[in-house]
Amino acid sequence: MARDITINAIKRLPIYYVIFEDLYARGVHRVSSSELSAYTKFTSSQIRADLNTFGAEGRQGYGYHVETIYMDLKGVLGLDYKKNLILTGVGNIGQAIIQSREFESSGFKFIGLFDSNPNMIGLSFNGIKVRNISELEDFAKNNTIDIGVIAVTSNSARDVARTYEKIGIKAIWNFAPTVLDLDKDIIVENVPLSESLFTLNYLLKCKNDGTFTSDDYVNRAKDIVYDKKLGQYRESKKRGRPRKENN
Amino acid sequence: MARDITINAIKRLPIYYVIFEDLYARGVHRVSSSELSAYTKFTSSQIRADLNTFGAEGRQGYGYHVETIYMDLKGVLGLDYKKNLILTGVGNIGQAIIQSREFESSGFKFIGLFDSNPNMIGLSFNGIKVRNISELEDFAKNNTIDIGVIAVTSNSARDVARTYEKIGIKAIWNFAPTVLDLDKDIIVENVPLSESLFTLNYLLKCKNDGTFTSDDYVNRAKDIVYDKKLGQYRESKKRGRPRKENN
DNA sequence: TAGATTGTTAATCGATTAACAATC
DNA sequence: TAGATTGTTAATCGATTAACAATC
């Protein structure tokens, strides 16, 4: 039976997908939850629970059939059909995304590129011509767009987002460090580059500080909890079923 | 008194920092937890609790003094002193990172760029020459490196990581979609681009599916829980102190 | 002062996990 | 068969949040 699924579990599914894609490409046929645990650092219990959320079936004594689960995950995540993407802002990040081969095998295809810089307009990337952003509305009338990517600088991100909203785009992948204030029914996924760097730096500082005494805390294999009574950071207690007493 | 702090709260601190930086730059002097709630979609309770984790002081009836908290956050996150970065892989993503102005004001400074492509070696970005990656070990002997950035393709990411490990780098910002298997005392922050796109796509699919009936679920202002009894997704119940009964 | 807003507590839900029966 | 590993339950800890006294 399907189990409870939460946003936390949803965010782990792509992680499993990437691993299964790799296993499949390498010709691995079966994998157990404890092997997956080694790859992900999640507990094997959690992995079994997560895979169960979408009805993945393993076999006792065998584990999971890589191809089956890979295809299941493709289906669940919607990576088994074609998605049309457009991108605005053909700068460095934009070009990196367009030219990445990472997304093709999961059905993502760029069909339009836009920029406001006259030097960029007319150039081609991956066989796709860069158009003036003013042509976006017309383009949208003649093409089905599933996802809009924003790869412009912070200043113009809001304008681009509003244009996307106007032409009916319902999903936005945003690389600008800007909070977009859009209609509620538009899904936005931000890629918070600086936040990621700041977190890294903070953990490094804590390590150098001696704020954390175990490397496990820093690597976040374990959760960190500040214990008021101890007056210091400690590994969080395991949630879940308590370990059996040894007598 | 300092409150419990966990990895979840730590990850929110950079979010607050970015907001306070923006408020400060715009000359805003004070901000209340409920205003911050509007920006972040976190509850004002959570914001007050989070700011308390590092001893930030607000004033009743006034809120938080923007400059004070901004400077406090800088100190807490270690963004008030200089960090030396090197980067390997001066491709599109690499160039995007080097040329971003986003990190400078928080003390991050690139001091070395490396690549294995002969066409890149010798070029300069932001006044920094690209060196052959074979020079990295020597470079490390003569320079203090705080953070190593990996912006190469998946194939060579593990090699670069091992070189970083060898020369004693303790913090790695990894853009390659590759799990790095490094010594426990090295902190790795991955930037999982494809996972982010896959999550976006999944939420879009669920929306189109009708799997979620409220836009709030999709935008994740609310947590999503699959309720077995209802047989459908619903908003998760509020944790925390229960609402007072109205009689 | 009156109004606003913090700091903190008390309470609850959900995430997580060890165990183990089931079974391939 | 014997061994391995799943699927699921039962249990617990932590994250979260409404409330409200304190106080600027």
Image: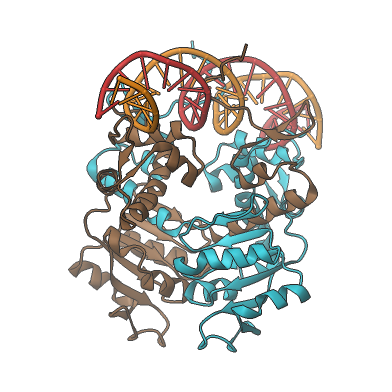
Chain colours: A brown, B cyan, C red, D orange
Residue B156 seen in the figure: yes
- Between D14 and B221, the one lying in front of the other is D14
Q: Residue A47 location in percent, x, y?
A: 42, 36
Quarter occupied by residue A149: bottom left
Q: Residue C21 location in percent, x, y?
A: 35, 13
In percent of the image, x 61 and y 37: which residue is there? A223
In percent of the image, x 30 and y 46: which residue is there? A66
Residue A133 seen in the figure: no
Image position of B63 with respect to A94: above or below:
above
Q: Quadrant of the N terminus of chain A?
A: top left
Q: Residue A174 location in percent, x, y?
A: 44, 60
Image position of A101 with respect to B21: above or below:
below
In percent of the image, x 33 and y 76: which residue is there? A134
Report the number of discs. 0
* A143 on left or right of B159: left
* A111 on left or right of B143: left
- Between A94 and A140, the one lying in front of the other is A94
